[in-house]
Image (cartoon, helix red, strand yellow):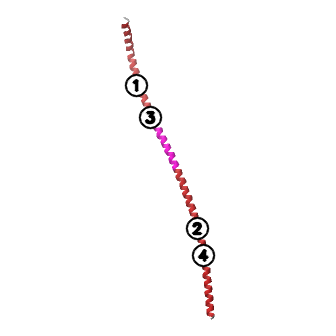
Amino acid sequence: MTDLVSRLNQEVALRQFRETKVKDLEVELKTNREYCDENMQQAVLIEREKFTQIQWNIELVWKQCLEMEVKLKNEQDERAHIQSSKLLITEKRLQRANLENYAGVVKVFSPTFSKLGRMTWELLFL
């Protein structure tokens, strides 16, 4: 009988040990879950911050791109204006050269026309 009591006491002690072990494991599991939840929340926050930063960077690059497009357009307009100004200058130079040629022709023929005019008046009034 003492054997049975002794064995019963061993079984009770083993059962208490196992219950304690189960409770310890449950507490450890709960602690691990809380730790994992906290880590997951921190990871999500970090990823959201990264995502937000990427959005800001994209916005900044987009703004810079638009500014560069405007700058490029202005430079193209300025080049076109300079090109048209050069064409105008060349055109005016050609016109001036033509005027100088006509002025030279007028100078050459001016005395002749004057003589013709005098001769015409002389013939009319003779």
> Which of marks 2 and 4 precedes in the sequence?
4
Q: Is residue 10 left or right of residue 105?
A: right
Is residue 116 one of those drawn in magenta?
no
Q: Nearer the viewer, mark 1 or mark 4?
A: 4
Q: Nearer the viewer, mark 3 or mark 2?
A: 2
* Inter-mark Cα distance, 4 to 2: 16 Å
Q: Are marks 1 and 4 in contact (CB under 8 Å)?
A: no
In this view, the residue in front, 77 or 110, is 77
> Which of marks 3 and 1 precedes in the sequence?
3
Q: Nearer the viewer, mark 2 or mark 1?
A: 2
Residue count near mark 3 (Cα–Cα under 10 Å), binned few <14, some 14–19, many ≥20: few
Per the image, the residue denoted by label 3 is 84
In this view, the residue in front, 119 or 105, is 119
Looking at the magenta stretch, what is its main secondary structure?
helix
The extreme bottom residue here reads 1
Per the image, label 2 sits on a secondary structure element best described as helix
> Which of marks 2 and 3 precedes in the sequence?
2
Residue at position x 62%, y 89% from top? 8
Residue at position x 61%, y 81% from top? 19
Residue 65: mark:
none
Residue count near mark 4 (Cα–Cα under 10 Å), binned few <14, some 14–19, many ≥20: few
Indicate whether 83 appears above or below 114.
below
* Inter-mark Cα distance, 3 to 2: 70 Å
Per the image, the residue denoted by label 2 is 37
Per the image, label 4 sits on a secondary structure element best described as helix
Q: Is residue 40 left or right of residue 87?
A: right
Q: Amino acid at mark 4?
A: Glu
Per the image, the residue denoted by label 1 is 98
Residue at position x 52%, y 48% from top? 64
* Inter-mark Cα distance, 4 to 3: 85 Å
Indicate whether 79 appears above or below 27.
above
Per the image, the residue denoted by label 4 is 26
